[in-house]
Image: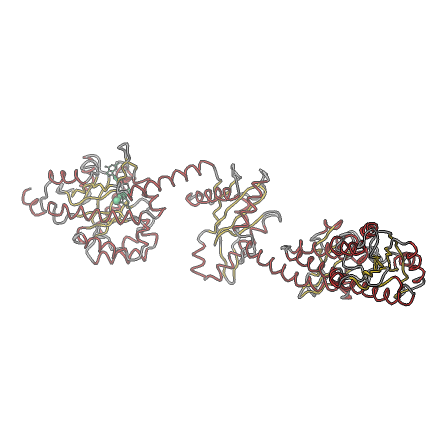
Amino acid sequence: MQDRDNKVFFAAEPASEHAASAERKVWRVLIVDDDSEIHAVTKLALSGVTIDNRSLQFLHAYSGAEAIHMLSTEHDIALILLDVVMETDDAGLQVARQIREELNNDEVRIVLRTGQPGYAPEEEVILNYDINDYKTKTDLTRGKLMTTVISSIRSYQQIRTINESRRGLEKIVNAAANLMERHSIHNFAEGVVTQLASLLGLNPEGLLCVRQASDSDEIVVLGAAGHYARDIQAPLQTISDGRIIEQVKRCFSEGKHLFLDTASVFYIDAKGIKAAAFIDSSQRLSDVNHRLVELFLANISVGFENVTLFEELRTAAYKDSLTGHANRAEFIRHLDNAVLAKDQDFVIAITDISHFSDVNDALGQDVGNKLIQAVGQRLQAHLSGDAVVARISADVFGVLARSHEIAPDTLREAFFAPFTVDEHRIPVMMTTGFSRCYKAVNGLDLLKQAYIALKNAKNHRLESFANYHPSMQAETERRLELIRNLRIAHQQRKLELWYQPQIELASGRMVGVEALLRWPQPDGSFIAPDIFIPLAEYSGLILEIGHWVLEESCRTMRDIDASVCSDFRMAVNVSVPQFRQKNFAEEILNIMQGFEVPPQRLEIEITESIVMDDPNLVAKVLSDLKSHGVRIAIDDFGVGFSSLSYVQRLPLDKLKIDRAFVRSAHTDSGAVIIETIINMGHRLGLQTLAEGIETDAQAAYFGELRVSQAQGYLYARPMNLDSLKRYIDLHPCREEGENLVNS
Ligand code: C2E
Ligand code: CA
Ligand code: CA
C-alpha cells in the first residue's frame, strides 16, 4: 500500500514527461457483466469520452469472482459498472460488499446494473456499500450512460483528492511525532532529512545545515542521512561535494527553497534558527509535494524549538553551570566508559584547591567563583582536547586524561603562575589524588580510588599529591570498620574512663587525676586512645563520646569528693570538634552543675592544635570557663613549638611538659629546651607538670627545676574507678598545711 501510494501520489514527474503521462492520465473503468455483448455496447457508448482531458480505459470481468480478482490486482480503478445477476442472483451485490468490506476499497465508485427493472436493490445495500447509481441495462444509451460515468468519476476524483490529502497529513503528523521523540538535535536533524525524503518518495540522502549565528558565515552540518551521515557536525566548508556547498549557501542567501535538476534545497526558518535541508533528487517536485513540504517544514519549526529546549535541559543535567565543564554525574559517565573500554592508558585525577574557603571568605564569593572558573580553564588549557575536565564539587575538579598528559609535575607547572582575578593576584595550590584504574569495576569505584588518594595527599604534609594504591583502600576500610565498632562500643557503654594520679613534687601528695579513655576488647586487651581518638574526631563521634567523658568524670569527682584534698582536680582532655560546638562552655558548666561538682574541681586539657584551629574562638570559650573557676592546662606543650606567643594571650593555669621532652632530659639539647619551657612557665606565673615520669632520677631532675607536679608510671599507671578508690584509701589526703606541719 505504502509503495503504491508513494508512486501515484508523491512521485515526481519522470524526466520524459510526455510519454509517461499519456499512459497514466486515463480513468480506468471496470465493466463486470456475464454478457459479453454488454461489454461491447458499453465501450461503444462511451468511446471518445474524455473527462478533464483524460480518456477512459476499460477493464473487463465476466463474473463476480473475476471482478474481485481484478480489483485486488489492478489499482486506480475509478468506476465499476457492475451487473447484479451473474453466477448467482446477487453476485453483483456480493462483489460490492467485498470491495468495501474485504478489499477496504472505499474509493472506487460503483454503478449497479440489472436486466429487469424492479430488481432494484434495497436502500440499505445502496447506503452500506456506497453505491453511486442504479441503472437498468436499457439505460445504456450514450447520453444516459455518460451522465452517470461523468458524475461518478468526478466523485471518485474528489474522494481521491481528499484521501490523498489525508494520507499526506497523516504522514506529516507521523513524521512530526517521530521527530518529537528525537531528543538530540543531531538525531532530530537526521530525522528531518529522512522524513523529507520519505514525503517526497526519495532515498533518504541529504543533510541539514544551520547557520551558527545570523551575522556569521559559518554553516555547520547538523544532521545527515545516507551517504552524508559521516559529515555530521562538520563545517559545511569541509564537505567534499562543491555542489552542495554552493547550493546550501545560495539557499541561505536567497532565503527560499531551491528546486534544481539534481537536488532540492529547503529553507527552514524556525524561531531563531535558520536551516537548509539539502535532499538529493534527480526529480522535480510536483505541486502537491510542494504544498506538503511547506506544511511539513512549518511543523518542524515547532520540533526544532522542542529539541533545543530538551538539549538545554540535558545540558543542565550534565554540565556544571558555573564553569561549563562536565559535572559530577557526567564525569562518572566518562569514567564508566573508560572502565568499560578496558583502556589501561588513562589516569584520573581529583584535584582540590587548597584553602579555597579562605579566598571565598576574604575576597568574597564573586572572586571565589571567578577563581574556580579560571582554575577550570587552566586545567583544560594544559590538557589535550580529548581530556575530560569536570567540576565535581565546590572547589574540586576531576580530570580524565591519557597518562602522559597528567602527572604531578604537569599540574605543578600548570599552577605555578598565580591567578589574576579582578585586581587580585591569587597564588593557588592544588592537592591531587591520582588513580590508574586499579581493578575498578565502574566509574564510581574509580572516583572513590582517586578520592582516597586525595585524602591521603591531604594528610601528607610534605607532598601535594598521592597515587592511589590498593593498600590505601584497605587502610580506609579498616578505619571505617574501627569507627563502626567504636560507635557500637560507645552506644553499648563499653568505653571506660580510667584515671592517672597527678602528684605534687614537693609534697608527694595527689593533687588530681587525669581522666583517660579506655576501649576494652573482648580478649582483655585495649585499643589505644592514640588510635581511636583521631577516628572519633574524624567521624564526629568525639562529640558524643566527649560529652560522656565529661559526665563520667564529674560522676567520679562527686563520688570521691569527700575523700580527696580540697584542691584536688579532675583533668579532662578535650578535642578540636568539641570546641567548635556552639555553647561548649555552657555545656561543661551544665554537666558540672548536674553532678553538683564545683567548677574549681575541673581542669580542661587543651592542645596546641585546638588553639591553632581558631585562636579567637578558643580564647573566648576559655575565658568564659575560667571566669566560672574552671582551670585550663595546655597539654603536650612544646611539641610543635609553633607559637609561644599565644601562651601569653590565653587564660592558662598550667603547662604540661610533653613526655617526649621528659625522655630527652638527659641530652644537652633536651635539657636546654626543658629549662626554657619551665622558665617561661615560671615567668608567666603558670603551674608546670612533667608528664611520663618513670624514674626517680627524672623526678629528682624536675624537682630541682621547681616543676610543681608530675604524672607518670613512677607514681601510678592509669587505673579504673575501683582501683582509684583503693589508691585514694592508701594515699589519704594530707592538706598542704598538714603536710608542712608534719614535715
Ligand atoms: P595525653 O593527654 O598526653 O595523655 C597522657 C598519656 O601518657 C596517656 O596515654 C597515659 O597513659 C600516658 N602515660 C602516662 N604516664 C606515662 C609514663 O610514665 N610512661 C609512658 N610511656 N606513658 C605514660 P593514653 O591513655 O594512651 O592516652 C593517649 C592520648 O589519648 C592522651 O594523651 C590524650 O591525648 C588522648 N586521650 C585520652 N583520653 C582522652 C579523652 O577522654 N578525650 C580526648 N579528647 N583525648 C583523650
Ligand atoms: Ca592529656
Ligand atoms: Ca600529654
Rendered location of residue 439, percent (x, y): 52, 36
What coloring was used for the rendering?
Answer: secondary structure
Depth check, front residue: 310 or 15: 15
Task: Write the residue at 67% across / 57% down.
Answer: 179
Residue 520 at what x, y percent from top left? 27, 37
Does residue 250 appear in this view? no
Q: Nearer the viewer, residue 454 or 664?
A: 454
Q: Residue at x 12, y 45 (%)?
A: 564
Q: Nearer the viewer, residue 253 or 376?
A: 253
Left or right relative to 399: residue 17: right
Image coords of residue 33 (percent x, y): 87, 55
Side (left or right) of 193 relative to 506: right
Q: Relative to 553, say whether 374 is above or below.
A: below
Image position, residue 361 (x, y; %): 42, 59
Taking the spot 16% from the left edge, 43% from the top edge, the residue there is 504
Q: Quadrant of residue 347?
A: top right
Is 549 situated left or right of 153 in this image?
A: left
Is the C terminus in the top left, top right, bottom left or bottom right quadrant? top left
Which quadrant holds residue 320?
bottom right
Residue occupying the far top of the picture: 523
Q: How many marks?
A: 0
Asked whether, in this view, residue 701 is left or right of residue 218, the answer is left
Q: Would you say residue 497 is visible in this rendering? A: yes
Position of residue 151 relative to residue 632, above or below, is below
* Figure quadrant, ligand 1: top left
